[in-house]
Image (cartoon, rainbow, N blue to C red):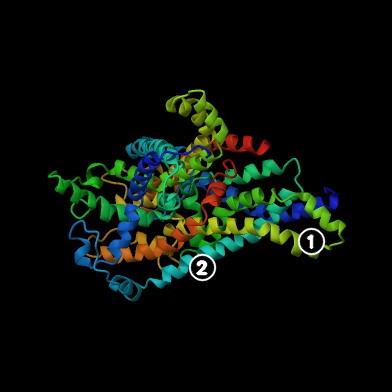
């Protein structure tokens, strides 16, 4: 903005913005603080100064068998993202570089599959998974997460690929680059940022998916979503530990999320808002 | 570029995505439709037969159905109201020149990345708990009786938690749209003597219209299926007070073992979602033409 903002106005807005931000961030901050309290402190009233104990983190890892759901979350979100990319990259590429009159219809149809409510297919999916022995397996859940996010992946890649100018391909061809040279030297460097962004958003979505991950698993394949949800019934006296488990569950994705603000807007609005 | 050779190749490249999604869409949906006309209970799998419209009538006459339908609408409507109005306000606020804008932005968008079970449990145990929660502490500090949120206002509690999760999404999208507003246009309006209110109504709001539409439609798709938040907080209760359609279907299917009834509910959910999807597709499709 060219216009100078009066310092008083800036300070007023700063104070207001920080208050709002701290208010919204408070539940996360308080979880972090509670995770380094003792169990006694955690239920003894509002207190922002913990005794900085790491006991809960140690306990969560030893007693509660935390690493299994954690590694399940990592494996499921990475694997489903990779599979989705392998399937989606060629499709998005074809649609971006050799569009036909039907390309738009295909894209819209793909998007429409995303509108199907999960509960509507809960019964058949559950029964099929049961009959095929896929309940509580990583294979089954990876497949589910891949299918759920495939439309978003195709769409996001398509909006990125569409921005790569077609002339560059032709220029490379004129310079005598073979198909392989074209792919390695021209296309890959130009497509990588888009693929990386898509990957990032998809990992976040897969990590936080909380319908199928809870319903289709019990112990073996249960990721963090199911693990944390299993703490819903017992009350009290374990909040510090629950906070430690929660902090560990959200930290990696929170940090990734901070770096993906732009991609998030683009990916979740299907390119409608840039 | 569209020689017949490359067209064949591009079809081949699209085939896996299209094929998988086609199967993914048709098979389970066809099964749901089929089951919805069947008398099929998992506890009595030998006795499966054609039921006609019985399941639909059963679902329709179940008092829980209308309650859950109303709850679904209340959750969607309540969350949309909070997130759109709040999102516009916060987006306008952090679009101003302030100190530490980056950190403010990071704090505001953070709730969106918290997985639903964690979000719900944090609110349930540490914020809204009637004896140990922060809100109860505050109430006692003020000499008031602490509120037992999930017993007294179960639906409102769910709305608050879900709105907390989606407010960052609305804010982020509206902020992105706001930042694409032409600075010169704003200055011109200001110089023409347009006050802050008329600038907002005649310049900012029309510019945001498209982003607001997108926020409403996309959130509605997700909000129709709110599930984990209900599961870990109220489990749908007390009674059916916080059961939405998604939760009712889950309950019918996996707790009541009633495949037919749940499938009929599923078809109703599909119809509901399709009404919304129709408008969303039009909004997105329009953008594709530009």
Q: How many marks?
A: 2
The percent coordinates of residue B94 (x first, y second) are: 43, 43
Residue B132 in the figure: left or right of residue B160: left
Residue placed furthest toward the bottom: A62
Up the image or down, B149 lies above or below A56; here it is above
Q: Earlier in the sequence, mark 1 or mark 2?
A: 2
Query: Quick one: B186 or B261, which is closer to the camera?
Result: B186
Find disc 2 in the rendering and name its residue.
A75
Q: Secondary structure at mark 2?
A: helix
Residue placed furthest toward the left: B143
The percent coordinates of residue A7 (x first, y second) are: 40, 41
Query: Quick one: B184 or B290, which is closer to the camera?
Result: B184
Name the residue at 33% across, 39% down: B64
Q: Do we see residue A220 in this rendering?
A: no
Residue B181 in the figure: left or right of residue A72: right
Query: Quick one: B32 or B125, which is closer to the camera?
Result: B125
Find disc 1 in the rendering and name its residue.
A182
């Amino acid at each position: 903005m060219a216009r100078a903002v009066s310092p008083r106005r800036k300070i007023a807005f700063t104070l207001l913005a920080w208050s709002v931000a701290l208010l919204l961030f408070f539940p996360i901050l308080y979880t972090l603080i509670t995770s380094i309290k003792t169990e006694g402190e955690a239920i003894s009233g509002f207190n922002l100064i913990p005794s900085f104990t790491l006991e809960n983190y140690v306990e969560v890892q030893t007693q509660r068998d935390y690493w299994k759901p954690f590694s399940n979350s990592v494996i499921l979100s990475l694997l489903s993202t990779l599979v989705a990319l392998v399937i989606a990259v060629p499709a998005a590429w074809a649609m971006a570089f050799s569009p036909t009159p039907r390309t738009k219809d295909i894209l819209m149809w793909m998007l429409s599959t995303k509108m199907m409510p999960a509960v509507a297919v809960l019964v058949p999916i559950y029964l099929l998974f049961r009959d095929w022995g896929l309940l509580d397996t990583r294979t089954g859940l990876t497949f589910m997460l891949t299918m759920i996010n495939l439309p978003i992946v195709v769409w996001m890649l398509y909006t990125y690929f569409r921005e790569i100018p077609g002339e560059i391909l032709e220029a490379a061809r004129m310079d005598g680059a073979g198909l392989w040279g074209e792919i390695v030297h021209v296309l890959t460097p130009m497509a990588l940022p888009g693929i990386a962004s898509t990957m990032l958003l998809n990992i976040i979505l897969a990590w936080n998916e909380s319908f199928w991950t809870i319903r289709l698993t019990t112990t073996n394949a249960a990721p963090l979503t199911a693990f944390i949800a299993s703490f819903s019934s017992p009350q009290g006296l374990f909040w510090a530990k629950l906070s430690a488990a929660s902090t560990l569950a959200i930290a990696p994705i929170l940090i990734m999320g901070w770096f993906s603000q732009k991609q998030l807007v683009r990916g979740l609005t299907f390119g409608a808002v840039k | 570029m569209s020689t017949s050779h490359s067209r064949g190749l591009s079809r081949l490249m699209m085939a896996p995505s299209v094929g998988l999604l086609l199967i993914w869409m048709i098979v389970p949906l066809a099964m749901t439709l089929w089951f919805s006309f069947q008398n099929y209970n998992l506890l009595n799998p030998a006795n499966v037969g054609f039921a006609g419209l019985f399941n639909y009538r059963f679902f329709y006459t179940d008092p829980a159905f209308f309650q859950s339908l109303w709850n679904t609408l209340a959750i969607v409507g309540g969350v949309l109201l909070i997130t759109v109005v709040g999102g516009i306000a916060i987006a306008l606020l952090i679009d101003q020149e302030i100190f530490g804008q980056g950190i403010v932005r990071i704090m505001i968008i953070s709730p969106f990345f918290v997985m639903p079970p964690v979000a719900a449990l944090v609110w349930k145990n540490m914020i809204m708990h009637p004896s140990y929660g922060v809100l109860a502490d505050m109430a006692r500090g003020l000499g008031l009786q602490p509120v037992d949120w999930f017993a007294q206002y179960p639906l409102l509690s769910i709305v608050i938690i879900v709105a907390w999760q989606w407010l960052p999404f609305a804010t982020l999208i509206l902020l992105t749209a706001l930042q694409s507003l032409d600075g010169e246009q704003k200055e011109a309006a200001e110089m023409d003597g347009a006050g802050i209110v008329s600038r907002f109504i005649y310049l900012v709001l029309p510019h945001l219209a498209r982003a607001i539409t997108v926020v409403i439609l996309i959130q509605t798709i997700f909000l129709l299926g709110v599930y984990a938040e209900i599961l870990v907080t109220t489990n749908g209760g007390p009674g059916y007070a916080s059961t939405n359609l998604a939760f009712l279907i889950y309950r019918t299917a996996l707790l009541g073992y009633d495949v037919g009834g749940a499938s009929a509910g599923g078809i109703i959910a599909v119809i509901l979602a399709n009404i919304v999807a129709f408008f969303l597709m039009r909004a997105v499709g329009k953008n594709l033409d530009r």
